[in-house]
Amino acid sequence: PREPLQSLDLFSRTPRSYMQTYSGQMQALVDAAVPRHDAAVALQLGAALYLSKHTGLPRVFDEAESGVLKDEYHSQPPGLQRIRRGLTWWKFTHFLRHLTRSFERTTVVSPVELGHLREMRCDSSAIRVVPNGVERDALGRPNSPRPRRLIYPGAITYSANLDAVRYFVDDIFPLIKVGRCDASFTVTGSTGNIDLSSFSDR
């Protein structure tokens, strides 16, 4: 059954994609946990929705992102699809502006993203640029090349990544091993509780 927040998603100020993935059970867990903490961080927009009403403690909305949706709208040629994308962008603009105002601080990954939020009339005084990655000088330690070693950095706890790894191991890697018998394949992302026994012979 649809949860209460989802019932009028077409008319809500919250974009439909977030209304449809909203979980009342998750909201209850967040509501119960918040009073036991001194501060909270919401990792990306989906999580920020659950913390937006908790004004009693300092909160950070981490990695607000709008560029992809903006590009989808502006890249559409004239026509019905552009109108639909435009309405989605308009709704998202109002939603993100309201959401960032409900947090003490918001971070973005680049000055370009900061510019997007400024165009949306978000309060830039409460937004900070925190780039992904590390300073180049921090990468100065020596590193020896390891030929014929393949690495998959994604977390296979995400079903699409797990499917990709299974496909690679079953259908692609054996072909590589024919020409490079000493080739190796390593998953460096999170594996969670996934049974890896089926990969052991690879």
Image: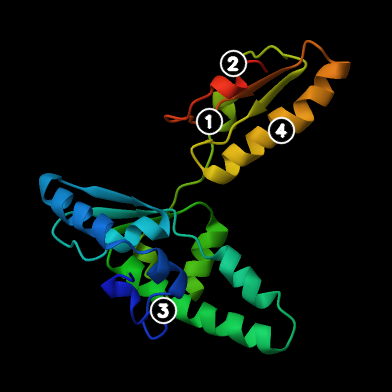
In space, the residues marked 4 and 2 are separated at their CA atoms by 31 Å
State which tag comes first along the sequence, 4 or 3: 3
Q: Which residue is found at the position 65% from the left and 39% from the top? A: 164
Crowd tier of the residue under label 3, counting other residues whose Cα lies within 10 Å: few below 14, some 14–19, many 20 or above: some
Q: What secondary structure is marked by label 2? A: loop
Q: Residue at x 11, y 51 (%)?
A: 35
Contact check, label 4 and label 2, Cβ < 8 Å: no
Mark 2 vs 3, N-terminal side = 3
Which label lies toward us, 1 or 2?
Answer: 1
Say whether disc 4 or disc 2 marks the residue closer to the N-terminus.
2
Between 181 and 144, the one lying in front of the other is 181
State yes or no: discs 1 and 4 in contact (Cβ < 8 Å).
no
**Is the residue marked by circle 4 packed among few (<14), some (14-19), or many (20+) residues within 10 Å?**
some
First of labels 1, 2 by sequence position? 2
- Asked if marks 2 and 3 touch (Cβ < 8 Å), the reply is no
**Pointer 1 residue:** 189
2 or 3: mark nearer the eye: 3
Q: Position of residue 134 (x, y in %)?
A: 53, 34
Report, in whole angstroms, how far the alpha carbon at label 1 lies from the one at label 2: 22 Å
Give how far across and how far down residue 57 sits, in percent: 16, 54
Secondary structure beneath label 3: helix
Q: Nearer the viewer, mark 4 or mark 3?
A: 4
Residue 183 screen position, x and y as percent: 76, 15
Between marks 1 and 4 in the image, the one whose residue lies nearer the viewer: 4
